Image (spheres, rainbow, N blue to C red):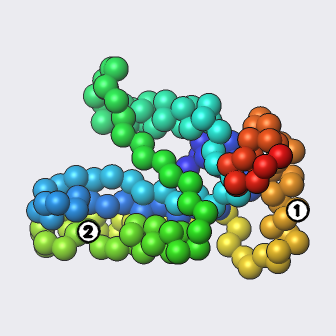
Amino acid sequence: KRKLKRTYPDLRAITRWHWFGDSDLSKFHPHLNILVDVLQKIPGEDLEELKRYYKELLERISGVNIGNKKIDVYYQYLKTKGRIIHAVKYIMRPTFLIYQRDLAEKLKGFRNNVYWGKWRDQTYEEIEREAIRREADTKIKPEIVLLSNKICP
């Protein structure tokens, strides 16, 4: 969270842990979901830096040296309202469907949903101003932003 907030100070996001995977509801498989509200794709070098930071964080928390093993970070940029709504529903769904008393006791009081940033309604003009300001601050060439939005420069 801190790394994202430092890199993108005006960021707003939601994080939520899923404790179990989709295929085996009884197998403990914790993974963190993060939905970030950005107006353009995260540049590749920023994404690589976040992956490195996440790997260091996992090593620090677990005390296990991961070495050269790959850390799974699934990143997707969603543009359409329908896909964004689906992503919100997906991460907000419950995954702790088979009760396990020991785990439930350990998770008691744990804040599973964490929100940060300014969550307010914005006018179209405010969003447009924010997009222009972010484009001015980014390392990405404007032509790339246009092309990624299917606009010929």
Residue 108 position within the rendered picture, expressed as x and y whole percent measured from the top left:
29, 69
Q: Earlier in the sequence, mark 1 or mark 2?
A: 2
Which amino acid is tagged 2? Thr
**In the image, is 128 to the left or to the right of 102?**
right
User: Is 68 or 115 nearer to us in this picture?
Assistant: 68
Which amino acid is tagged 1? Arg
Residue 49 position (above or below residue 147): above
| Residue located at (13% from left, 60% from top) | 24
| Residue located at (48% from left, 60% from top) | 15
**In the image, is 67 to the left or to the right of 127?**
left
Residue 148 position (above or below residue 81): above
Q: CA distance from mark 1 to mark 2?
A: 39 Å
Residue 67 position within the rendered picture, expressed as x and y whole percent measured from the top left:
33, 20
User: Is 121 or 2 nearer to us in this picture?
Assistant: 121
Q: Are marks 1 and 2 in contact (CB under 8 Å)?
A: no
Mark 2 residue element: loop
Q: Residues within 10 Å of mark 2 (few under 14, many from 20)?
A: some
Quarter-of-image position of residue 21: bottom left
User: Is 126 or 17 nearer to us in this picture?
Assistant: 126
Mark 1 residue element: helix
Residue extending farthest to the front is 152
Q: Is residue 140 in sight in this rendering?
A: yes
| Residue located at (62% from left, 31% from top) | 45
> Label 2 belongs to which residue?
95
> Label 1 belongs to which residue?
129
Residue 55 position within the rendered picture, expressed as x and y whole percent measured from the top left:
42, 33
Residue 37 position (above or below residue 98): above
**In the image, is 103 to the left or to the right of 9?**
left
Quarter-of-image position of residue 89: bottom left
| Residue located at (61% from left, 63% from top) | 79
